[in-house]
Amino acid sequence: MGWLPLLLLLTQCSGAPGQRSPLNDFQVLRGTELQHLRHAVGPGPWQEDVADAEECAGRCGPLLDCRAFHYNVSSHGCQLLPWTQYSPYTQLKRSGRCDLFQKKDYVQTCIMDNGVKYRGTVAITTGGLPCQHWSHRFPNDHKYTPTLRNGLEENFCRNPDRDPGGPWCYTTDPAVRFQSCGIKSCREAACVWCNGEDYRGAVDRTESGRECQRWDLQRPHAHPFEPGKFLDKDLDDNYCRNPDGSERPWCYTTDPQVEREFCDLPRCGSEAQPRHEATTLDCFRGKGEGYRGTANTTAAGVPCQRWDAQNPHQHRFAPEKYACKFTPTSAPHAHLEENFCRNPDRDSHGPWCYTTDPGTPFDYCALRRCDDDQPPSILEPPDQVVFEKCGKRVTRLDQQRSRLRVVGGQPGNSPWTVSLRNRQGQHFCGGSLVKEQWVLTARQCFSSCHVPLMGYEVWLGTLFQNPQPGEPSLQQVPVAKMVCGPSGSQLVLLKLERPVTLNQRVALICLPPERYVVPPGTKCEIAGWGETKGTGNNKVLNVASLNVISNQKCNVKHRGRVRENEMCTEGLLAPVGACEGDYGGPLACFTHDCWVLEGIIIPNRVCARPRWPAIFMRVSVFTDWIHKVMRLG
């Protein structure tokens, strides 16, 4: 049978009350299609006679050669797929009309019960031995014959004999006939810190053994926690979560007589918590959750604020403000002692603290990663990314007028680019609107992190550096707060006095995932009202296109000075690039149907120098910091 995935869309499901939904066997990826990169297999059939996605799940579920499906709400059709995102030659692709449902057994990385239904792609044992193919009888002979029903594919770990130890395989070592693959149960794969508001595991049963109701269904129990309205709660499928700050994770059940129950999940205790580092170490492993040293200054040399103090910075890690009570006395596992550097929220940058500097709410500590646990380079191939409601713009008539000649640019539409204004109302730098009340810009735009902000404004919604008084689309918002970025970031976040109004001329730009790397060759744009060196009109917003190049190629010209927290665009024969007045503005790259803020314009040795790659600050290295600043307010 041949198959070819098409673009399709999810709808809310319905069904008879009190019945288990077949959708419970599936995980959904919203706004996503599954694409096969090789077309040796032909297109599969549309099924146009289904009532909803639930009926499509009912058709796919019993079929051994169906592993996923798409659903189209406009045509009420679905397409059954023999692949998942982990199958060879497949990739996930952003779609405005499509949601993808995949069978849990094929995409979960943990097992339920003893893993008899596990159909994942792990193929190595706990001892590091590669698995032998199930269709092979050498070096270890065996009695099993691969079929669709028993799922003995390739050399993947399976449990055909219901071994209590979970999935296993025959090994390629003649001296070791078989060995366990050590795949964790979903219950043990993720433990619960505090009240489990950040639990994101895959357990879908309550403590009494009842199956959980899907969060995107309203039966058998109607509820207010619709996934689309609580995006930060990760209300995935029918997994246990804690969206309302309860005592611990819970779910609505599929039993009409029992509305909701807590889930039986292991707590992160002495046996489950991260390894504690000796107090004398000046390094940390992983994310540093287990660091228990006595470092108490930031990388910039600023002393840390005590965790049990609320001055100069109020924070959520206090009994009266945080449901989990991450405090020195009430959460021993957090060990928020005195003013020592810690990582209670598992920030990817490692241990941090609130600072004693009123102008810097928090910063990362002067700690290095231990040599035996170096993080992977960010310059590895990027993962697939899906963005939501940001980075969209509408083509404007202004762009279709005269093409006047940032340097070498032309008037363009960049609704997330803002103009920073000093006390005299003069433009001095650019910036990017990353949230309705937050602008990201460059540290070089300010003389210090403690500049009095009275009179500073952000102007949005205009193409002109000096718009006419009363221009209807112009928004002028005072700057209320400045937060300088971590050491070496060259970033500054500005909090505005009030949220801006989003419209066709004012839009948010997407932030990249932490440590995301833009593939070389990606088309990007810079925008600004800066100096044009005679190539155009610096009274209007100019936009120029540039292509990303790898840091390795960039360092050929720059002689190894480009760091991983920086990125480059190729040098052109003509002078095209950023100059005075553009600093702090965006390098926006088109990624999966959205414009994403991948770089920040910083001063280069010579602006718009022909044939020389331009260097930008790489935003993805500091995405976690940006989100934390905005979250803390």
Image: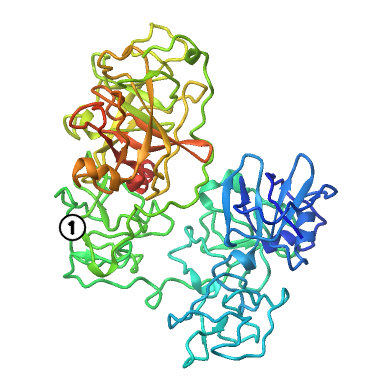
Query: Is residue 479 rendered to the left or right of residue 39?
Result: left
Give neighbour class at mark 1: few <14, some 14-19, many 20+ (Cα, 10 Å): many
Q: Residue placed farthest to the right in the image?
A: 49
What residue lies at 19% left-to-right and 45% top-to-bottom?
A: 561
Locate residue 446, reporting x and y percent: 20, 29
Res 28 quadrant in image: bottom right
What residue lies at 56% left-to-right and 90% top-to-bottom?
A: 140
Q: Residue placed farthest to the bottom in the image?
A: 175
Locate residue 69, reporting x and y percent: 70, 55
Query: Is residue 535 rendered to the left or right of residue 521?
Result: left
Image quarter of the N terminus:
bottom right
Front position in the image: 102 or 459: 102
Res. 438 in view: no
Locate residue 416, reporting x and y percent: 42, 27
Locate residue 51, reporting x and y percent: 82, 49
Instruction: Count the marks.
Output: 1
What residue lies at 49% left-to-right and 77% top-to-bottom?
A: 124
Front position in the image: 99 or 25: 99
Q: Which residue is mark 1?
A: 296
What is the three-letter code of the residue carrying label 1?
Answer: Asn
For the residue labelled by badge 1, is the local secondary structure a helix, a strand or a loop?
loop
Res 110 quadrant in image: bottom right
Coloring applied to the structure: rainbow
Is 257 situated above or below 501? Answer: below
Res. 378 in view: yes
Front position in the image: 218 or 129: 129
What residue lies at 26% left-to-right and 31% top-to-bottom?
A: 611
Front position in the image: 353 or 311: 353
Is 333 situated above or below 126? Answer: above
Is 576 situated above or below 338? Answer: above
Query: Is residue 254 rendered to the left or right of residue 301?
Result: right
Image quarter of the C terminus:
top left
